[in-house]
Amino acid sequence: MSVFDDLVGQERAAAVLARAASAAAEAVAGGRGAGMTHAWLFTGPPGSGRSTAARAFAAALMCPDRGCGHCDLCHQVAIGSHPDLESVRPQGLSYSVKQTRELILRAAGAPTLGRWRVVLFEDADRTTEAAANALLKAIEEPPPRTVWLLCSPAPDDMVTTIRSRCRLVTLVTPSAAAVANVLATRDSVPPALADFAARAAQGDIERARRLALDEEARRRREAVLSIPVSLSGVGECISAAERLVKTAEEEAAAATAELNESETAELRKAYGEGSSGKGLNKGLVRGGAGALKELEDRQKSRATRIKRDTLDVALLELVAFYRDVLAVQFGAGVVLANEDRRADIDDLARTTTAERSLRRIDAIMQCRERLAANVNPQIAVEAMTLDLRP
């Protein structure tokens, strides 16, 4: 058993990381450690398992047996409690230079257990320009036992200077069969449901797991895929856009409400709210007004990100639907991602042209670009649904 066994369909990347872990163990023992470097960049499409691969490599670096998968150190890395692992995932739309500098200071310390100090930075492409510059300096001049593991969808999402100083690990989209096998063996999902979820998720392992285990996720997918056949007029287009945006807002609110409340309560308590003593409560709460405002800004940014990510998942579902339509129109002998919507796909394939299908896919991708550029979601999605009309 190895920590790399969890990397579904990533045999080549797993072999590279296993060899590097062996080199790292050699370096710890006083050898050259050829093949080990201090900065790594994990890239791959959504759902390919970038952070999973990075975490597995972190466990292999910490483990005396190079990632056995069953010792206490491997378990601590898996759950994020290892004292020498700094795990970061930007919760908002971006990661600021202030946060990056604080992270660099934490990463500069010597390893507690004597092997490596590892920084696992998910969504590293969300760093601001100033933050990227600060990160570059840390990667250029790292402490001798600090290893940076950066995760990004594509190499080009990171600035060239950072990319050139990292060893690249490229992950691929796992096959539907591999994903279905994982769902059936590890999550005890019935084979038919596992096959459906794997096809619908198009290789995105986490998305497939949600579809297989969460009935609400399947319901939301059905609502999205019913849109193409419902756009008979302008009114229907506006209503469909409103439903998409409202669903994203509700999901963001549900995902953040409890966390926001607990964070705010903890901050108020830290600044003395509820404390006894003359003048103590009022003075400390007033002193924490700036910190409270900063927290509220972070919470709004986090909610916006969740809303945007939820919308993006829906848009990618629509892209997959029209891509299936295009495959039928060209007579391609491929397995459709949305085989369960075969009747709707065949109907659109008969009544529209391949050129029209391509234009619809372009309209969805343009909507994604507009949302990334902070265009009002309602306006961006309405423009898209109008372009999707028959």
Image (tube, rainbow, N blue to C red):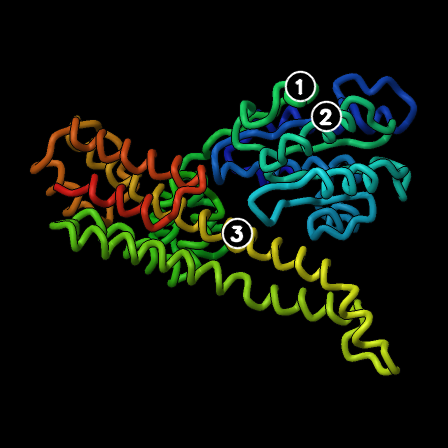
Does any portion of residue 331 appear in the rendered image?
yes
| Quarter occupied by residue 67 | top right
Residue pointed to by mark 3:
186
Q: CA distance from mark 2 to mark 1?
A: 7 Å
Q: Earlier in the sequence, mark 2 or mark 1?
A: 2
Does any portion of residue 2 appear in the rendered image?
no
- Residue at (23% x, 35% y) in the render: 360
Q: CA distance from mark 3 to mark 1?
A: 40 Å
Of the residues shown, which amino acid type is indicated by label 3?
Answer: Arg
Q: Earlier in the sequence, mark 3 or mark 1?
A: 1
Of the residues shown, which amino acid type is indicated by label 1?
Answer: Thr
Point out which mark residue 161 bears.
Answer: 1
Of the residues shown, which amino acid type is indicated by label 2?
Answer: Leu
Graded by Cα atoms within 10 Å as few (under 14), some (14 to 19) or many (20 or more), the crowding at tag 3 reads few
Q: Is residue 97 above or below residue 190?
A: above
Comparing labels 3 and 2, the label whose residue is closer to the camera? 2
Q: Is residue 294 above or below residue 381?
A: below
In-image side of 30 versus 132 (left or right): right
- Residue at (59% x, 41% y) in the render: 94
Graded by Cα atoms within 10 Å as few (under 14), some (14 to 19) or many (20 or more), the crowding at tag 2 reads some
Residue pointed to by mark 2:
136
Q: Is residue 294 above or below residue 135?
A: below
Position of the C terminus, as image quadrant, is: top left
Question: Residue 18: image x %, image y %?
Answer: 69, 28
Q: Secondary structure at mark 2?
A: helix
